Image: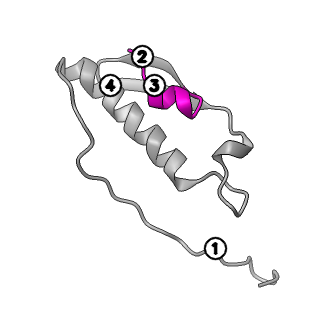
Amino acid sequence: MPHPFAELIALNVDEQRAGHSRLSLVVSEDHLNPHGVVHGAVVYAMATVANLESKVLLEDRLVATANGHYAIFTPRPAAGGAA
């Protein structure tokens, strides 16, 4: 199934069948946040696309993400590391 948003962020749907999907993404600078790590929205998008792709085939109907949960963690230096 064509997925314009997945194409926009260069997300590849490598495998999909009812109840299962596998995606991949080659991380580029476009996917990074100002701290130089993959932006959380990219990870969330991957999870959402993977879930929806497999659900559409499993239930044979259109579905949409209505709710999600995420947590924000503050990185801390390793023991003995710089603050």
Q: Pick the quarter of the image with the C terminus.
A: bottom right
Q: 10 Å neighbourhood of mark 1: few (<14), some, or many (≥20)? A: few
Which label sits on residue 4?
A: 3
Asked which secondary structure carries label 4, the reply is helix
Asked which secondary structure carries label 3, the reply is helix
Q: Which residue is drawn at 40% across and 60% down?
A: 70
Q: 10 Å neighbourhood of mark 3: few (<14), some, or many (≥20)? A: few
Location of mark 4 (residue): 54
Q: Pick the quarter of the image with the N terminus.
A: top left
Q: Which of marks 2 and 4 is nearer the N terminus?
A: 2
Asked if residue 48 lies left or right of residue 66, the reply is right
Q: Are marks 2 and 3 in contact (CB under 8 Å)?
A: yes
Location of mark 2 (residue): 2
Return the residue nearer the eye: 40 or 2.
2
Q: Which of marks 1 and 3 is nearer the N terminus?
A: 3
Q: Which residue is drawn at 53% across and 71% down?
A: 73
Range of residues picked out in magenta: 1-11
Q: Distance between the Cα atoms at labels 1 and 3?
A: 33 Å
Type of amino acid under label 4 = Ser
Q: Residue at x 42, y 41 (%)?
A: 47
Q: Earlier in the sequence, mark 1 or mark 2?
A: 2
Q: Is residue 46 above or below residue 81?
A: above
Location of mark 1 (residue): 75
